[in-house]
Image: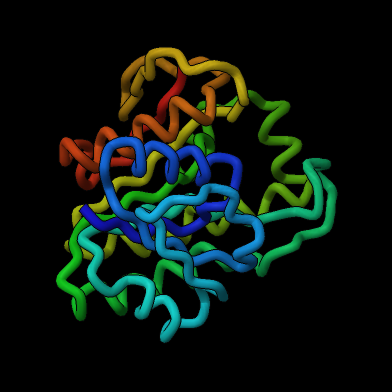
Amino acid sequence: MKILLLGATGRTGILILEQLIQRGHSVNILVRDRRKVKLDSEAVNVFEGSTLDINLLGTAMKGCCAVISALNISRKNDFPWSALRTPPNLLSATMKNVIKLLGQFEIKRVIIISAWGVNETRKDIPAWFRLIIDNSNIAPAYTDHALQEATLAATDLYWTAIRPVVLTNFSTKKVKVSIGNKPKPGLLISRKSVATFAVDILEQAEFIGLSPVIFN
C-alpha cells in the first residue's frame, strides 16, 4: 500500500514511518523541513511544506490509499509551559483539509494518533495530570485533538483515533487496549508500541469507528 503519513519527523511519527517501510509499504510524507528526514529509502517520497496548504496536501495524497496522522501541537521544548511552535488549531485544521480531499482520491481509511484524556477519557486521567493540562501549554493539544476527533466522527470514513497513555521511549511491550467501560489503563506506553499498533490496525482493518486507549 501507499500511505500518506503526516507528522513523520516527530518522535512517534518516525517510528511509524520505519514500521511502514519495514513491512513493505511505500510512504508519502509531508514535512515542514525535509532536512529533518533522516530515513533514506526509495520507499519514501518527501513533500515539504505545511499541512495547512490544501493544494500541497492534495499533491502529497495522490496515489495513496490511506492516511495516518501523527501530528501534534508542538512546543519549543518539553517543558509544559513552553511557548507553542505550531498553530493551536493545527490538528483540526489539517483534518478538515484531509477530509475535503479524501473523496477526490477515493480514500476512506484514516488513522490519527490522539491522546488519553481527550473527550470522555478525561475523567480517567489522574487529577494531577488534569491540573497540569489545564494550567499549561499542553492544553491546546488536548483541545485540538478533541476537535479533530469530532471532525472525523462526523464523517462516514473508516477512521480510528488511537489514544495512547503517557508516551515513553522505553522498549516495546505487548499493547493492551481499553475501550468504553473496560478497566482503566496503565499510565505508560512506549512510542514503538504505538507505532506497531497503528500499522497493525491499518493492515488488519481493525478498530474502525473507534477510539481505543492503548497502554503497556
Q: How is the image coloured?
A: rainbow
Direction from residue 108 to residue 184 in the image, left or right: right
Task: Where is residue 58? Give x, y as percent.
Answer: 35, 79
Task: Where is residue 216? Give x, y as percent.
Answer: 46, 16
Task: Where is residue 135? Give x, y as percent.
Answer: 79, 45
Identity of the residue drawn at 32% across and 23% down:
181
- Please say if 212 is above or below 90: above
- Please say if 170 is above or below 109: above
Count of marks overlaid on the render: 0
Depth check: 54 or 148 in front?
54
Direction from residue 141 to residue 18 in the image, left or right: left
- Please say if 158 is above or below 125: below
Depth check: 62 or 134 in front?
62
Depth check: 104 or 212 in front?
104
Residue at the extreme bottom: 55
Identity of the residue drawn at 75% across and 37% down:
132
Direction from residue 164 to residue 82 in the image, left or right: right
Identity of the residue drawn at 48% across and 53% down:
146
Q: Residue 109, located in which quarter of the rendered image?
A: bottom left
Identity of the residue drawn at 47% across and 60% down:
147
Task: Where is residue 77? Give x, y as percent.
Answer: 81, 47
